[in-house]
């Protein structure tokens, strides 16, 4: 049904901002309604696979450690770390926490930050190829002119 799919919970840049869950699904236009239905189902009721925690922890640790930085990016990151409330590289604080992470922590974050929250879904594609009647079952559809989103 989908060519690609993924999601990330972004850490806010500023202390008083909230995290944002961003997800995507790449699919054929005629599978859009089905893909949105699956995506909404995953957001509203997170699948639970506690046996995958070791892989999650390794992903967090390894992904954090291999981030390559040039000098300019490091300067911007240092400013952002300060805005987030860190005194130095947050990796020094996060790595020990990743080691202690358990599946109950993941569930707690999901319950607090995602479950029963409002969300918006953007769909890019040829409207005539999308089953809009089926898509309406997921919520209100607002059509946006591409010229208001994109410029040359």
Image (cartoon, helix red, strand yellow):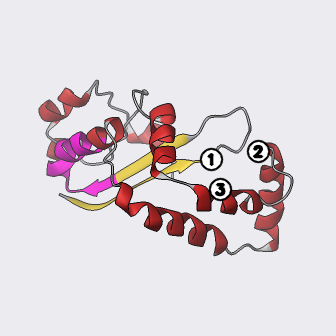
Where residue 61 sits in the image (x, y, percent)? 59, 68
Q: Nearer the viewer, residue 89 or 14?
A: 89
| Disc 2 target residue | 84
The x and y percentages for residue 81 are: 79, 52
Give me the residue at 33% from left, 49% from top. Answer: 48
Foreground: 38 or 147?
38
From the image, tell me which residue sits under label 3. Answer: 97
Alpha-carbon distance for marks 3 and 1? Answer: 15 Å
Q: Residues within 10 Å of mark 1 (few under 14, many from 20)?
A: few
Judged by its main secondary structure, the magenta piece is helix
Q: Earlier in the sequence, mark 3 or mark 1?
A: 1
Q: For the residues marked 3 and 2, what is the alpha-carbon distance in whole angstroms? A: 17 Å
Q: Badges 3 and 2: C-beta atoms under 8 Å apart? A: no
Label whose residue precedes the other's in the sequence (2 or 1): 1
Q: Whole-percent x and y of residue 58?
A: 52, 69
Start-end of magenta stretch: 25-39
Q: Is residue 150 visible?
A: no
> What residue is at 56 percent from the left and 54 percent from the top?
101
In contact (CB < 8 Å): disc 2 and disc 1:
yes
Question: In percent of the image, x 67 and y 34: which residue is there?
Answer: 17
**Could you say where residue 121 lies in the image, as x and y percent from the top left?**
36, 37
Question: Which circle marks residue 11 in the picture?
Answer: 1
Name above or below for residue 117 compared with residue 81.
Answer: above
> What residue lies at 32% left-to-right and 53% top-to-bottom?
25
Q: Residue furthest right?
A: 87
């Amino acid at each position: 049904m989908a060519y690609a799919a993924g999601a990330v919970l972004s850490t806010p840049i500023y202390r008083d901002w909230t995290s944002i869950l961003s997800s995507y699904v790449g699919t054929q236009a005629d599978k859009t309604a089905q893909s949105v239905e699956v995506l909404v189902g995953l957001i509203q009721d997170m699948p639970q696979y506690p046996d995958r925690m070791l892989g999650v922890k390794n992903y967090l640790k390894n992904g954090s450690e291999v981030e390559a930085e040039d000098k300019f990016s490091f300067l911007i990151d240092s400013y952002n770390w300060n805005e987030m409330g860190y005194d130095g590289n947050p990796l020094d604080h996060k790595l020990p926490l990743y080691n202690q992470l358990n599946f109950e922590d993941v569930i707690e974050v999901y319950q607090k930050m995602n479950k029963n929250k409002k969300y918006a879904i953007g769909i890019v594609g040829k409207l005539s190829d999308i089953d809009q009647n089926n898509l309406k079952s997921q919520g209100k559809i607002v059509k946006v002119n591409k010229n208001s989103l994109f410029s040359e």
